[in-house]
Image (cartoon, rainbow, N blue to C red):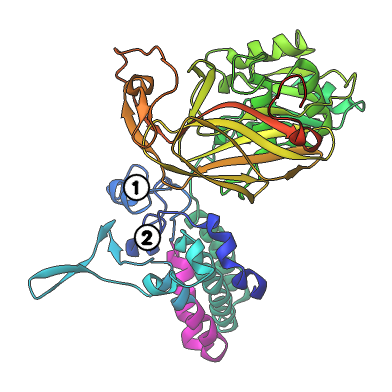
Amino acid sequence: FLPTLLNSRQLTFLAERGVVLFSIDLLAFIIPAPNHPLVVNSPLADLARRIVPFEIETVGYIGLVPLALTILSLRWRWRESRVWLILGLLTAIVSLGPVLHIGREIVRITVENDLFPVLMPYAFIGRLPFLQWSRTPDRLNETTMFAAAIMGSLGMAGLLSRIKNRKIGWAIWLVVCLDIPFEYIVRWPMPTAPIPSSPALTELARGTSFDAVLNFPVTDYTGNLNALFQQTIHQHPMIGGRVYRDQPGALIIHDFLSRTITATTGSDDIAPGPTVGQRAAALAHFGVGRIIYQPEGDPDGSARAALEALFGAPVATEESLSVYSVPSRQSPVTDPFFVFGANWYAPEQWQAPTRWFYGRASVYIFSDTDKTGALAFTAIPGNDLRRLIVNVNGVEAARFGVGDWAEYRTSSVTLHKGLNTIEFFDENGSWQYVGDPRCQNGSAVAGPFPFDIPCDANNREARDLSLAIQNLRFVPEAAQYSAQATFGETF
C-alpha cells in the first residue's frame, strides 16, 4: 500500500467520474434487488429500480432474517459482536457516498434560505490519495455484508443454544438456510447463454507454428470481451486484452498493429506508408501469426478489405469471426517506417502531401535495429506563432517556435529496435478554422505563403488545428553531415 500511495501521482489514470451514481441509496438497505421475484411485479418495483440504477452494482439489501439474527447477536453475544457492529456501521455509512440520497433524490437541508446537500463522510474520505481513485463507494457495502454475516452467525448460535428441542432447532436452522439465499436473489431466473462452438478457434488452439494472436478490429468494450472469451478457447497469447481502466500506453502495440494493417502504401502521405514486407516485419516482431477478424467492429467492411489485400483469403471463416494467416517474414527491413496514430487529419495537398494535427498527435516509427539520427519535417503554422514540442519515446527531443513555412530538424535521437512513439505537441493547444486553411494564403507572423496554393473556397468544415506537417522523415546520423550547398563544381 505504501509504494502505491507514494506513487499516486503516476496513477491518476485510475480516477473515474460517477461517484454519486455508484453510491448506495439509504432505502437500498431494506428493499430487495429490483429483479427479485417478490419485487419485480410488486408496487415496490418502480422504487427498487430507481434506487438501484445498476442491476448488480448498487444492491445493498441486508435481508430481514439476517437483520433479525444480527439484532439477536447484539443482545446475546455483545462482546463478540461489537467489533463487527462498528465495522458494519462504518462501511455502511461510507458506502452511501459523498451525499445522502433517499429514493435516488439527494437530501438537502435549508440554511439561511439556501438549500445544501447533506454531505456524508465519503465526501472527505474520497479526496484522499489512493481513495480518490475509487468511483464506487457502494462496494464498501460488501464489508458491511461480511460483518452482518458474522453477526448473523453469532445470533444463530445464540438462538440455537436456547432451543431445548433439537428437532425444532434443526427446523429453524433449515428455514434460515433456505431463506437467506432467497432474500439475496438479484435476478430470477438467472440469465444464461449457450457457449457457441467454434471449429475455427478449436483448430487455432492446435496451432504450434506461431506465438501470438491479434484480434482486429477491436473498437469497443464488447469487442474486447469477445476477444478475451475467444482466448479461453484458442489459448494463445494475444495482442490487446484490456481492462476497463487502461494503463497509459498499454494499448500502444495493438493500436500500432491495427493502424499498420489499414495504412496506405505509397507516397501520397507525408511519409511513405509501410510496404507489405514492412507490415509482415512488424507483425513478426511481436510474434503475431494469426489475426482474428471481428466483423462487429467493421460495419463498412474496410478492415476485411485491408486484411484480404495483405494476406489473401482467410484460412477459416465463421459467422462471428474469420482467421487470417500472417506469412512468415521473408527478408530484413532496413528502413524505418511511419504509421500515424491519434489526432491527425487525412492528407491534403499543399504542393506536397500535408497533414494537419491538433493538440497532441502521435506517430509510430518501427525500426529493425537501433538507429541514431534526427527527425526532419516541414511545418506550416497557418495561424500565429505555434510552440511545438517533439517527444521521442516520452523524452523531449526538440522545441520549436513555428511561425513560418519552413523545415525543422530535431537534435540527435535514438530509435530502438521495434516500436518507437513520436509525439507532436502544440503547447498553444489548437485553433479553430472554418473552411479550407489554404485560403488564408499566409500566416500572421510570416506573411504570405511562399507558394500559390489552390484552395476550396466553398469548404465550410470547422476543424481544430495546430500545425500542418510535410515531408516527415528520419535522417540517419551519417546523412546529417552531408553537404547542404554546391559551390561551382565542388562542395
Callout 2: SS: helix
Inspect the image, locate mark 2, and give the three-letter code of the amino acid beneath it: Ala
Residue at x 62% of width, y 17% of height: 303
Residue 291 is situated, as x and y percent measured from the top left of the image, at 74, 23
Amino acid at pointer 1: Arg
Disc 1 packing (10 Å; few <14; some 14–19; many ≥20)? some
Q: Could you tell me how far apart the alpha carbons at marks 2 and 1 are, in whole angstroms?
A: 10 Å
Looking at the picture, tell me which residue is in the foreground, 67 or 315. 315
Q: Are marks 2 and 1 in contact (CB under 8 Å)?
A: no
Location of residue 238 by image quarter = top right
Expressed as whole percent of the image width and height from the top left, the position of residue 55 reads 44, 47
Q: Residues within 10 Å of mark 2 (few under 14, many from 20)?
A: many
N-terminal label among 2 and 1: 2
Magenta stretch: helix, strand or loop mostly:
helix
Q: Nearer the viewer, residue 38 or 15?
A: 15
Q: Residue furthest bottom?
A: 79
The residue at the point 38 percent across, 66 percent down is 96
Residue 398 visible, this angle = yes
Which residue in the protein does label 1 denote? 49
Please identify the quadrant where the N terminus is shown: bottom right
118 lies above or below 254: below
Screen quadrant of the C terminus: top right
On screen, residue 243 above or below 146: above
Queried whether the magenta region covers residue 63, the answer comes back as: yes
| Extreme-front residue of the structure | 488
Instruction: Tell me, for residue 198, which label it has, or none.
Output: none
Q: Is residue 37 above or below residue 219?
A: below
- Residue at image position (55%, 65%) is 9
Magenta region, residue range: 61-87
| Quadrant position of residue 326 | top right
Q: Is 241 a magenta residue?
A: no
Q: Which mark is residue 28?
A: 2
